[in-house]
Amino acid sequence: MNKIFKAEDLPEKETVFLKKSFDGYRVVYPLKKEDGTWDWFVLLTGGTWWVLLKTFLVIALLLFVTWSYIQDTTQCRDLVENICDYRIRINEACTPTSGNNPLAQLNLSGLNIDGI
């Protein structure tokens, strides 16, 4: 938990910027220092290392979910296109050259699937 400071407890030359939000006040970190130069630590980390870590975790979670979705849809498309390769007991009736695709017996005309 963050320690609560009173204004008289801060050092004299310490500048703290506060912003009022819906749940109270929070510390904000300006992008430029008082002399007008860019504060690169704030630009790269968001002000604290904790903000950088939280941002990295959210981005990593979104990338993982996207990667997982792509993997799943790729496997489903491969299953639909090569159903004979996924059968447990492959028999001669299910060969790509025979045209006896088990999915061809189903009425899938409304699903817009190519190759069936």
Image (cartoon, rainbow, N blue to C red):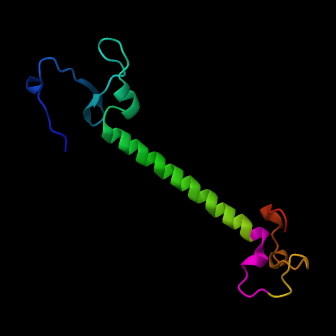
Q: Is residue 38 left or right of residue 77?
A: left
Which residue is found at the position 41% from the left and 48% from the top? 57
Residue extending furthest toward the top: 35
Q: Quadrant of the N terminus?
A: top left
Q: Quadrant of the C terminus?
A: bottom right
Residue 86 image point, x, y percent: 72, 78
Which residue is found at the position 78% from the left and 63% from the top? 111
Q: Quadrant of residue 83?
A: bottom right
Q: Quadrant of residue 99?
A: bottom right
Residue extending furthest toward the right: 98
Q: Is residue 91 left or right of residue 53?
A: right
Residue 96 to residue 56: above or below: below
Residue 57 to residue 71: above or below: above
Residue 72 to residue 98: above or below: above
Q: How many marks?
A: 0
Which residue is found at the position 51% from the left and 50% from the top? 62
Which residue is found at the position 32% from the left and 31% from the top? 47
Residue 71 image point, x, y percent: 62, 61
Which span of residues is magenta-colored?
80-90
Residue 53 image point, x, y percent: 36, 44
Residue 8 image point, x, y percent: 8, 23
Q: Is residue 79 magenta?
A: no
